[in-house]
Amino acid sequence: MLLSFIIILNYKNLRLLLNNKIVIFIAIFIFICIIQEVDLKTVILYILIIMSSVCMIGRYLNLENSFIRDFKGVAAFFCLYGTIVFVLLIVAKPLFSTLKFISNSEYIHSLFIFINSTSTLFPGWYRLSSLAWEPGCFQLVSSLYLLITVKERTNIKKIIWLVLIQILTGSSMGYINLIMIALFFLLEGRKSIVLIFVVAIVGIIVYPILQSNLYDKIEGSGSGSSTIRLRDLTVGIEKIKQNPIIGFPVSKLYEDTEAKAIEDRVWAQANTYSTIDNLGYFAGGYTNGLLGLFLNWGIPFALWMLYMLYKNPIIKYTSRLFVFFFVTIFLLTTISEPITFTPLFFIFPISFFYRDVFLLKRKKEQYYKMKNE
């Protein structure tokens, strides 16, 4: 429904589908789906994802619009909303009724949020997830927003706020991304004493938190989560080995006998309180979006997609270092989140097909900037 909504709102941009490169891209995709015997419903879903991505790209071909500016606006809303809801749940949780959702998740319909688990660092507190389906997904939004804020050096208080949000997500990948952002800051040219002090304090705080979080995921109550990640890694690698060129569709894993046998082995060797008997096969779905990309498209096509992701023209900053860290944080998150199956991923590689148009847009922007000066 959301994909259709995006397409309807930007229907004028559907003309961009007439681009020869997009036509070839879709043709290759359909060819791969035919070979993989993917069901029609999945094919239609992916075509809608591609169409909605193209419609969003069309918005940024206009001189007046900027992806980074729009992303900052959406991310700021997500982070502010998440902070307000987090405080409400601490001081007034009994006032909000919850509905049981899948697995151990709850849904608070009056606040439009999912609650996946409580924090291991702050007992009794819920992990901050805002409007995302889980904290690990939300931390991608807050991580990229923090990276942009550090790049722009505009507001120390905002940086501290976003660091706190990152910590309160309780996401191991969120903490790793914090380290990546600190590394970006250290490699960037412009620095200030205050920011260096903030980075040092963050490092001192994050290290024991990351250590404790990883221990809980491996040996503690969260060990089931790490086993699921290991399952997805093992299954993904094995199936890619068997189908390196055309891949093996993720949608077929749930009924694949061999994939289930691999999962049985992983759970049998795992030191965890959970088992397949009480969770079922592929509990939580296939979460490794990076390997999912290779499974769905095959190695050659997936590598091409990753190249286009890195070379995407939508990220306006000219700093190669910023683009590298932006893409790295995005890809690190896909290791534990199936984001490569969404328009948020596709918008970047597909924008590569319109690179010439974006370059022309940049030249026009520079011309008008010089003219106004």
Image: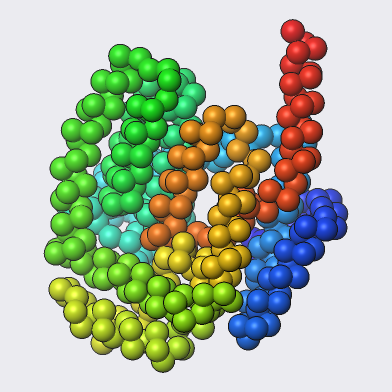
In percent of width and height, residue 333 lies at: 41, 53
Residue at 47%, 37% in the rendered image: 145
Question: Is 284 placed left or right of 297 in the picture?
Answer: left
Please tell me in which quadrant of the rendered image residue 104 appears.
Answer: bottom left
Number of disc labels: 0
Screen quadrant of the N terminus: bottom right
Front residue (pair 184, 369): 184
* Residue projecting furthest to the top: 373
Q: Is residue 121 visible?
A: no
Position of residue 7 relative to residue 312, above or below, is below
Position of residue 97 relative to residue 246, above or below, is above
Residue at 46%, 88% in the rendered image: 255
Please tell me in which quadrant of the rendered image residue 147 appears.
Answer: top left
In percent of width and height, residue 358 lies at: 74, 38
Front residue (pair 12, 117): 12
Task: Report the colour scheme.
Answer: rainbow
Screen quadrant of the C terminus: top right
Please tell me in which quadrant of the rendered image residue 195 appears.
Answer: top left
In percent of width and height, residue 154 lies at: 46, 20
Residue at 26%, 79% in the rendered image: 266
Front residue (pair 38, 24): 24
Q: Is residue 373 visible?
A: yes
Residue at 70%, 57% in the rendered image: 52
In percent of width and height, residue 77 lies at: 50, 39
